[in-house]
Image (cartoon, rainbow, N blue to C red):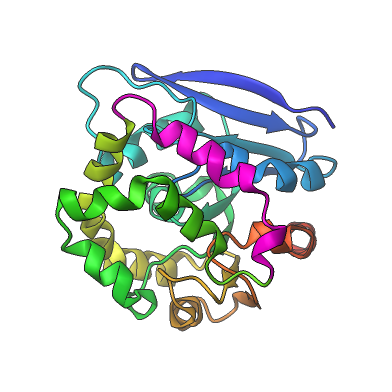
Amino acid sequence: MSVAYRYAEVDGARIFYREAGPAGAPVLLLLHGFPSASHQYARLIDRLAGQFRVIAPDLPGFGRTETPEGYTFTFDQLGVTMTGFVRALGLESFHLYGFDYGLPVGLRIAEAEPARLAGLFVQNGNAYTDGLSEVARGLLSATPEQIRPILEADGTRMQYLTGTRDPEAVDPDSWLLDQHYLDLPGRKDIQVSLALDYGSNVEAYPRWQAWLREHQPAALVLWGTGDPFFLVPGAHAYLRDLPDAELHLFDTGHFALVEDVDAIAALISKFIEGN
């Protein structure tokens, strides 16, 4: 199944996205995390596009997405823009896959458009303080000067390799492409702004937990247990509010798809077909 590369105009922003799969099939919306972009889902798209309409955008400030001058880089604004993206594409119903930064953006979309959410896939995306590691907690009070080293090549590589079963099997192009986008003019400033705003997500945790309890979306929680940022208790915490959710743990790192894409793709396929 071939992949199309497109742009959608949303309030002055040009949202780049990858799309593949049959037009009438169930929709899977893939929201990437830091410091990546939609390319992190290339192998997952390849495995699922025969069954589903798969859409993977680059969030504002990432990848090939273009934003207008004066765009405010906060998670609330990303949520507004990506809700507009969903509306612009006319996605009446979709399953949401939220990883890392993509999860808080996705939950904002779900709040704005609850009737459109057909199911929720959480992959190392935190919505509970249980899951915040000491590293993550430290970043909540970090200064711009403390954040900037994380945006350099060593920091990007660390995020991919920490917790993996076989670091030598991780394709270096994954973090090198991320670093290419991070090194574009102005991108590090954008990432500092988002990192400084991450506390807005933690403040929203109680609100999102209440939303999950009220709406009870069909949910599949997928978690790399070696994640240095988001700990396994954060995965189990979802079951407090979504007792019918499925939980699957993987012996890998933050970017679980790097080593376990086949297993995760199979779980997604079974889950969507069963719901």
Q: Where is residue 240 in the image (x, y as percent from the top left)?
A: 45, 83
Closer to the camera, 105 or 198? Answer: 198
Above or below residue 125? Residue 23 is: above
Quarter holding residue 268: bottom right
Q: Is residue 154 visible?
A: yes
In the image: residue 19, left or right of residue 87: right
Q: In the figure, is residue 196 to the left or right of 115?
A: left
Across the whole image, how many numbered discs are drawn on residues? 0
Q: In which quarter of the image is residue 266?
A: bottom right
Identify the residue shown where x is 17% and y is 59%. 142
Q: Is residue 119 magenta?
A: no
**Front residue of 155 and 261:** 155
Horizontal side of 146 relative to 129 (left or right) equals left
The boundaries of the magenta stretch are 166-186
The percent position of residue 32, horizontal first and vertical second, equals 51, 46
Q: In which quarter of the image is the C terminus?
A: bottom right
Q: Residue 10 location in percent, x, y?
A: 40, 21
Q: Residue at x 50, y 82 (%)?
A: 236
Quadrant that contains the N terminus: top right
Between residue 113 and residue 140, name the one nearer to us: 140
Left or right of residue 134, residue 232 in this image: right
Can you say whether 14 is above or below 155 in the image?
above
Q: Residue at x 48, y 33 (%)?
A: 180
Give the main secondary structure of the magenta stretch. Answer: helix
Residue 93 visible in the picture: no
Q: Which residue is drawn at 28% across and 27% down?
A: 186
Q: In this view, does 42 lie above or below 237?
A: above
171 within the magenta span: yes
**Location of residue 89 in the rendering, given as x and y in whole percent from the top left corner:** 55, 26
